[in-house]
Image: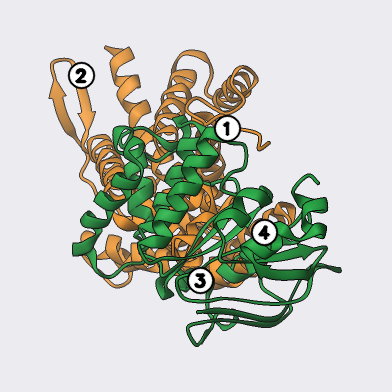
Chain colours: A orange, B green
């Protein structure tokens, strides 16, 4: 029974990683850049949700929506101001800029809201449902359900809508997409909007699990989710989903069966092994060399 | 219909197109021939907006294309079949064709145009649910042409449509280009296969290292000694 409950907890944690990893992987797939400020968008989302619940006394759905709106606007603004001017620049310049944005957001948060930890209110009641000897907390249930819903909506959006098809076209060939009449800049903006909106959802789920809000809150989940995206094959949406879930399960199993202190090291060791065997990640596309 | 005046295009410090002027009139097939590196593709990319010219003018039916965002050009009636086909390899044949109609407002007519493309290229219909990456080179060329036609262009730009294809397929592709033209679409064709291109062109221009050095009707250029010597294998 222990095994099953660890597995479910792992899937819960993995669901949060997966939602964050979707932001990394979509932006990489379309803008071909690693947005290392993504974790800090989560942090901003967490603060917005915290103030909405704690200071303004908004109900949970309103707080979540406010957090999504602010993060979406932040993601689009960051892209417009920091990344768009570098569209023709080398990828190293873009990477350094992303790290710069990350530090900027962390320090801005510290300046505005101080570095002291704020306690996130309890938003999901304790307790859960029992299936025989197995009990699943409401939080884990909600987290996994949210992740599955996000995945279904995103898959439908990408495959069934005109904008989704345009996004897939841009991820393959921006020049040819322009010839079709697709506004590539607009598609990149939409991608950042979606990724950042998902970061806000992840922020609330994360704070419900670990109820403390501080300026570097996004750093560790950010790097883990980035690992999950690479693990699953960066650029691939099902890959981010799979990578996130696996990473969560591995982390919880490592904590339960091997060592709490070593769990992060084990997670990254697994990543290294996977990349040694399959450099494109689990579901990554083979990159064809152009002749 | 399309009038290029004193066009210059540079890559950084290197000027690839050094001031060329030519025009394509309504209903014509016009071809630009020239060796590798003469600037043919550069010219095409400047017209379709993928490259920004350093100076000069590109007028399409009275609209200055150099002042327009690249993605808006296709909705003015100019579609390009790029060199190397550049189909969306991971999407199906049908999805590629639908993307070709991305900029169109008249959604109700798209179905009829899909039928038209399938009638020109029956093989695309057979393979409509396959991903484009699994098609042969010839089929990908057909798909790239079909995709451009889905925009319902008044002028179609074709960049090296015969590249890498067997002689039999080249004949088929050129036959279809003529058919598309007879149905009322103006064609600007860039080709290394000068003999074929001149045989279907109303008029032609020879592009050499960034300059237009010769022009005339397709027949005139096909008989021209300099063209024969340089491009038609003596």
Q: Residue at x 35, y 38 (%)?
A: B124
Q: Nearer the viewer, residue A110 or A187?
A: A187
Local packing at callout 2 (Cα closer than 10 Å; few below 14, some 14-19, many 20+) is few
Which residue is most to the right?
Answer: B13
Q: Which residue is mark 3?
A: A77
Q: Residue at x 59, y 61 (%)?
A: A106
Q: Chain of mark 1?
A: B
Q: Is residue B198 left or right of residue A244?
A: right
Evaluate whether label 2 is on the same chain as label 4: no
Question: In x, y percent, where is residue A222?
Answer: 53, 45
Between the C-alphas of marks 2 and 1, the distance is 66 Å
Q: Chain of mark 4?
A: B
Local packing at callout 3 (Cα closer than 10 Å; few below 14, some 14-19, many 20+) is some
Tag shown at residue A134: 2
Between the C-alphas of marks 2 and 4, the distance is 66 Å
Q: Which residue is mark 4?
A: B41
Q: Nearer the viewer, residue A30 or B165?
A: B165
Q: Nearer the viewer, residue A104 or B176?
A: B176
Q: Which residue is mark 1?
A: B166
- Image height of A113 relative to A19, above or below: below
Tell me the quadrant of the picture where the N terminus of chain A can be found: top left
Q: Nearer the viewer, mark 2 or mark 4?
A: 4
Evaluate whether label 2 is on the same chain as label 1: no
């Amino acid at each position: 029974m222990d095994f099953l409950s660890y597995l479910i907890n792992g899937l819960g944690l993995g669901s949060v990683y997966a939602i964050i990893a979707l932001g990394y992987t979509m932006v990489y797939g379309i803008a071909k850049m690693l947005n290392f400020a993504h974790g800090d968008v989560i942090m901003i989302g967490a603060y917005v949700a915290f103030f909405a619940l704690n200071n303004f006394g908004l109900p949970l759905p309103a707080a979540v929506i406010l957090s999504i709106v602010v993060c979406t606007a932040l993601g689009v603004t960051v892209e417009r101001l920091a990344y768009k001017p570098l569209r023709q620049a080398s990828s190293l310049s873009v990477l350094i800029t992303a790290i710069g944005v990350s530090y900027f957001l962390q320090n801005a948060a510290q300046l505005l809201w101080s570095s002291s930890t704020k306690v996130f209110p309890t938003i999901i009641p304790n307790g859960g449902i029992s299936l025989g000897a197995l009990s699943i907390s409401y939080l884990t249930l909600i987290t996994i359900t949210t992740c599955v819903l996000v995945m279904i909506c995103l898959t439908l959006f990408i495959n069934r809508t005109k904008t989704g098809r345009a996004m897939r076209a841009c991820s393959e060939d921006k020049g040819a997409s322009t010839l079709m009449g697709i506004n590539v800049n607009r598609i990149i903006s939409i991608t950042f909007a979606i990724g950042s909106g998902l970061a806000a959802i992840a922020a609330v789920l994360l704070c419900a699990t670990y109820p403390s809000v501080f300026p570097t809150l996004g750093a560790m989940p950010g790097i883990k989710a980035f690992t999950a995206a690479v693990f699953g094959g960066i650029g691939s949406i099902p890959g981010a989903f799979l990578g996130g879930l696996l990473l969560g399960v591995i982390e919880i199993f490592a904590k339960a069966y091997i060592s709490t202190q070593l769990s992060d090291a084990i997670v990254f060791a697994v990543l290294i092994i996977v990349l040694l065997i399959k450099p494109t990640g689990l579901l990554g596309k083979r990159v064809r060399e152009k002749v | 219909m399309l009038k290029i005046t004193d066009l210059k295009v540079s890559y950084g410090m290197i000027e690839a197109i050094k001031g060329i002027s030519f025009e394509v009139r309504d209903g014509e097939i016009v071809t630009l021939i020239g060796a590798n590196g003469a600037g043919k593709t550069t010219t095409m990319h400047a017209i379709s907006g993928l490259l920004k010219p350093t100076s000069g003018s590109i007028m399409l039916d009275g609209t200055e294309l150099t002042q327009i965002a690249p993605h808006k050009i296709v909705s003015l009636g100019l579609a390009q079949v790029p060199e190397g086909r550049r189909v969306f390899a991971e999407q199906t044949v049908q999805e590629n064709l639908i993307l070709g109609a991305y900029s169109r407002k008249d959604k109700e007519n798209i179905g009829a145009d899909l039928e038209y493309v399938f009638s020109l290229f029956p093989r695309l219909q057979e393979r409509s649910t396959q991903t484009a990456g699994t098609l042969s080179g010839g089929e990908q060329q057909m798909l790239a042409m079909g995709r451009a036609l889905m925009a319902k262009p008044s002028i179609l730009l074709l960049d090296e449509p015969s590249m890498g294809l067997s002689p039999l397929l080249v004949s088929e592709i050129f036959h279809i280009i003529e058919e598309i033209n007879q149905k009322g679409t103006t064609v600007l064709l860039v080709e290394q296969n000068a003999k074929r291109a001149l045989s279907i062109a109303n008029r032609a221009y020879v592009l050499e290292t960034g300059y237009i050095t010769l022009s005339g009707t397709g027949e005139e250029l096909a008989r021209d000694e300099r063209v024969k010597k340089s491009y038609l294998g003596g």
